[in-house]
Amino acid sequence: MSEANNPGIGESPQPAPQQQQQQQRPEIVLDDKQAHAAYANFARVTATPEEVIIDFALNPNPFMSGRQEIQVSQRLIVNFYTAKRLWIALGQTIQRHEATYGAVELDVTRRAHPSACTLPRMAANTKVVR
């Protein structure tokens, strides 16, 4: 046997190069000074065999029925590895949000109640100044 494979007494074996890479995590520092922020209330996800394409848009009439044409304002194209990491991160974020604030209702008709928009009732002796 060679000495590289058989460490001497009192010596600790050195981790294989592959193990060293797995143990060291890269430190990533983000510089967001040039980042473009945009709001979207609509997203469409499509894919090719190699990439995931996410289109973002602002739908000014989300409660309107029938055909609507909206402009895609941002398009994000990522590989499937990045898409899966994004999926995991979004899932964790939504779980924390729902644990704090309750379930996120996706059905617009269930969350858009007229009763949710009612104003608080004023006391009978309250004067309204106009």
Image (spheres, helix red, strand yellow):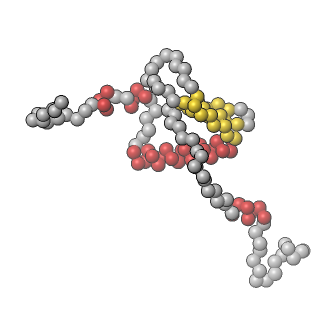
89 to the left or right of 103? right
Quadrant in the rendering for residue 87: top right
Q: How many marks?
A: 0
Question: Which residue sits furthest right?
Answer: 1
Picture residue at 43% right of the left edge, 28% below the top = 108
Picture residue at 15% right of the left edge, 32% below the top = 128
89 to the left or right of 16? left
- Residue 60, horizontal then vertical, whole percent: 47, 26
- Residue 90, horizontal then vertical, whole percent: 55, 44
The quadrant of the rendering that contains the C terminus is top left
- Residue 75, horizontal then vertical, whole percent: 62, 34
Quadrant in the rendering for residue 103: top left
- Residue 38, horizontal then vertical, whole percent: 53, 37
Question: Which residue sits furthest top?
Answer: 66
Picture residue at 44% right of the left edge, 38% below the top = 104
- Name the residue nearer the viewer: 41 or 92: 41
Does 119 sit above or below residue 23? above
Does 86 sit above or below residue 24? above
Q: Is residue 88 visible?
A: no
The quadrant of the rendering that contains the N terminus is bottom right
